[in-house]
Image (cartoon, rainbow, N blue to C red):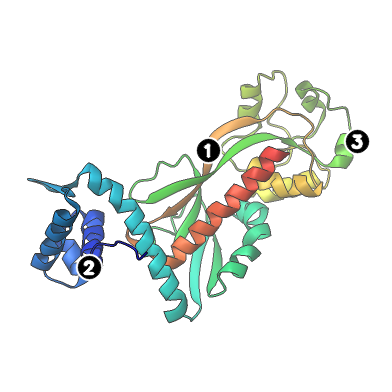
Amino acid sequence: MGRKLPNLNSIRAFEAVARHLSITRASEELNVTQAAVSHQIKGLEERMGVMLFRRHNKGLLLTKEGQAMTRPLTRAFDIIADATNLIINNEVQILKVSMFSSFAAGWLMPRLKSFYDRHGNIDIRVIVTSKHFDQLKAGDVDIDLRYGDGKWPQVESRKFLSEEIFPVCSPKLLKNGPPLTSLDDLGHHVLLHDNKDIGWKEWLDDAGVKGIDHSRGPGFFHAHLTLQAAALGHGIALGRTPLVSEALKKGDLVRPFDISLPSGMGYYVVNMNSVTSKSKIRAFTSWLMEEVRIYEEGVSSN
C-alpha cells in the first residue's frame, strides 16, 4: 500500500508557519505569497478536519493538534535536507566548535574519530575558549560546548553531560604513599588545584571534612594540567566525571574513595537561535548525543 500523505506543499507551508508562528515570515522563507501560504493552511485544515492554529490579536498560536504535528514534521524536513545536502554539497564543510581545553583533551578527542568516520565531508575546527570572551556571540564559531549552569540569554542550549566530583590520584601514589583509608587522610597528601569554581574548599565542606588546610599545594590554570600532575604522582586532584573517564579506564588515575559529589554544573551544546537549521550543526549534535549515550551506558555498567 502506498503512503496516505496530504499535499506536500501544504505540509511544508504548515511546518514553516508553525516554526515562525507567522504567515509573513513563512511566505518569505518559501518565496511565495502570504495568500498562497494561507490557502495551503486552510486546505490542510479542511482535509484533516481540525484547526491547526488559533488566531489572536498578537498573531498565531498552535492548537493541540498543531503542536503534535510540528516537531515530527520539522525533524522529517531536517532529515530530507541533510540527505540531499550530502549529495548536492559534496564539498568539505568547516564546523568551528569552541570548548574548554580540558574538555577537548579529556572527553572529545578520544571520540572524535567516530565523527569523521560518519561525516567525512565535515571538518571540525576545535577552538579553545575562555570565561572572558564569548566566541559564539562574536561569530567566531558555529557552536559552543559550554560548561556551566545552562543560564545564558539569547542562545539555544541543550544539556548533554552532568558532572560529579571526586578525588583522583596515580596508582603508585595510592600504593606507595601515605594511607588513604578515609577522607581525613587527605591532610597527609599534597592537594592539587585547578581553576574551576568548585575547588578543594567547597568539596571538603560539602563532604563534611574539617581540619584540612585546603589552600596548600600547587595550582594549574588548566584542569587537564592538574590531572596530568596527579597522574604523574605529584598529589591528589579533584576529578570531574567527563574529564577523567578515559584516564580512569586506562588506569592512569584511580579513585581512592567511593564518594562522589554532584557539582550542579554540566556541559551544554550552545548555539545562536538563528543558526539551528544548519545541517552541519545538526550532524554534530546528533553524533554528540549518541556518544554521550554510549559513554553513560559504560559508566553505569562499571
Splitting the image into 4 quarters, where does residue 271 fall? bottom left
Percent position (x, y) of residue 237?
A: 72, 38
**Residue closest to the far right:** 176
Residue 127 in the figure: left or right of residue 249? left
Tag 3 secondary structure: helix
Q: Which of the two residues, 269 or 129, is positioned nearer the viewer here?
A: 269
Looking at the image, which residue is at 54% across and 59% down? 287
Q: Nearer the viewer, mark 2 or mark 3?
A: 2
Sequence-earlier tag: 3 or 1:
3
Tag 1 secondary structure: strand
Sequence-earlier tag: 2 or 3:
2
Marks 3 and 1, how far apart in space? 32 Å
Dot label at residue 175: 3
Query: How many marks do you count on the picture?
Result: 3
**Residue closest to the far front:** 1
Graded by Cα atoms within 10 Å as few (under 14), some (14 to 19) or many (20 or more), the crowding at tag 1 reads some
Percent position (x, y) of residue 240?
A: 65, 40
Q: In the rendered image, which residue does mark 1 sit on?
A: 265
Q: Which of the two residues, 42 or 25, is positioned nearer the viewer here?
A: 42
Rendered position, 54 above or below 104: above
Q: Which of the two residues, 134 or 213, is positioned nearer the viewer here?
A: 134
Q: Amino acid at mark 3?
A: Lys
Looking at the image, which residue is at 70% across and 27% down? 259
Q: In the rendered image, which residue does mark 2 sit on?
A: 9
Tag 2 secondary structure: helix
Percent position (x, y) of residue 168?
A: 75, 38
Task: Answer whether residue 76 is visible to the viewer in this image.
Answer: yes
Splitting the image into 4 quarters, where does residue 12 fall? bottom left
Rendered position, 192 above or below 71: above
Dot label at residue 69: none
